[in-house]
Image (cartoon, grey):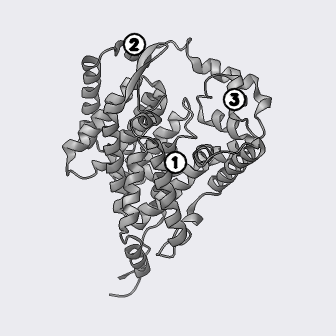
Amino acid sequence: MEQTVDRTFYKDAALEHNPRIVESILVCIIAFSATVGEQMNVYFPFASKIYVFSGFLLLLMMCFRRLLRLQSGERILAKMPGSFWMLFFVIFLVTFARLFSSGVSIGILDLVERMKTPLFMLYGVVLCTAFLDYEKNMDMFCWSYLLGFILMIPFGRSGDFTTAYRFVGTYTNPNTYGVDCIIALFMSMYLLKDRKLWVIKTLFALAAVVCLLRTGSRGALMSVLLGIALIFMFTKDFQKKFIFITLGIAAAISIFLYSFKDTSGVFVRLFEKSYSGNVRLQVWQAYFENFSKFFFFGASESVISTIHKYTPHNSFLGVLVRYGIFALVPYIAFILYNLRYSFKKGRDRAAGYSDRVLSSLIFSLTMSGMTMENINHRATWVILALVLYNVYNYEKRPRIKFVMGRK
């Protein structure tokens, strides 16, 4: 019996992973700037816009070189689910129509701000293309994201949010910063796939957990716990890495409880059993009572502000409120697509540690969308890049053909 291997796969893979220096630099800048919130504009003007402009440069580079066709001949756009493109076009058309009908002349920064959601969606696609084009871009992205996350902590601030004094980082909303903490934690776990610099990676994970607890975000905390539980469920042998991370989280909770001022209110908020005073219930009720104002094509910010002073606090409701039912349907289909491949790859016996971490990250961010509106958050579409990278590598495997009767 002779084993013959499809050499085309390896030839294409070799071409596909050729490094591009400028591309890698832009990937690192995008990752670093993805952690920069709007409060950083106080220290550095337009600091929060670096992500937008660096992502736009990478988008232009990919358009001119190989967004539509990778060097290997594979079409990354063909791998995208139809639900994603339907969601993109609906959001783009609704946003553009709303902008055009307003009749107000706006500057370039205002234009970028209003079109940020479709832009962020495209950035997810080009980031995935960069990861596939050069495999090390993925690791560089994670390191740059974690570096930015750590460096932003000293610039962060806390604020009084009714029931507790909560940490918001460089953002204005603690829940938004909670999403960044989720990504930072799972990226640290992803990098633990090898033992080099494991102390630094573990410290990054501890910092993410401490910051997450300080936000007082119950949705973010529950999402992390579900994501970690999923890793354990996927993994039959309890590796030392998982045990170490569990002990690290316990240590982080201890640090959180004894090292920061005014943490008692946050701790009570995180673990209280009663949700009678939860503002989300009031918010959801207000939006459902005004269903007719946004059902078909969504509502503008001015209309949304008349419904309730808070955002919908749910990604699905947020899509419906802002873009209408024609965006909600493909959004649900796209979420189900992500979850399907996450569970499929996580349960695969051939899947490794890093595969399971990425699958759990996708699941965790999806769960966070139940209590937070993250459709307009750039981190949501960073995860899109990880989803596509995960799916693409799962489907693209060398085909081995066995020829019987030969020695």
Q: Is mark 1 on a helix, strand or loop?
A: helix
Q: Is mark 3 on a helix, strand or loop?
A: helix
**299, above or below 55, in the image:** above
What residue type is disc 2 on? Gly
**Outermost residue toward the bottom?**
406
Foreground: disc 1 or disc 3: 3
- Residue 351 at least partly seen: no
- Residue 200 at least partly seen: yes
**375, above or below 5, in the image:** above
- Which is more toward the observer, 251 or 144? 144
Spatial CA distance of label 2 from label 3 is 31 Å
Q: Name the residue under label 3.
A: 304
Q: Which residue is drawn at 58% across and 40% down?
A: 375
Q: Mark 1 points at which residue?
A: 381
Whether residue 383 sits left or right of residue 200 in the image: it is right
Q: Quadrant of residue 178?
A: top left
What residue type is disc 1 on? Trp
Q: On residue 265, which mark appears?
A: 2
- Which is more toward the observer, 231 or 21? 21
Q: Where is residue 48 in the image (x, y as percent from the top left)?
A: 46, 42
Whether residue 310 sits left or right of residue 403 in the image: it is right
Spatial CA distance of label 1 from label 2 is 32 Å
Spatial CA distance of label 1 from label 3 is 23 Å
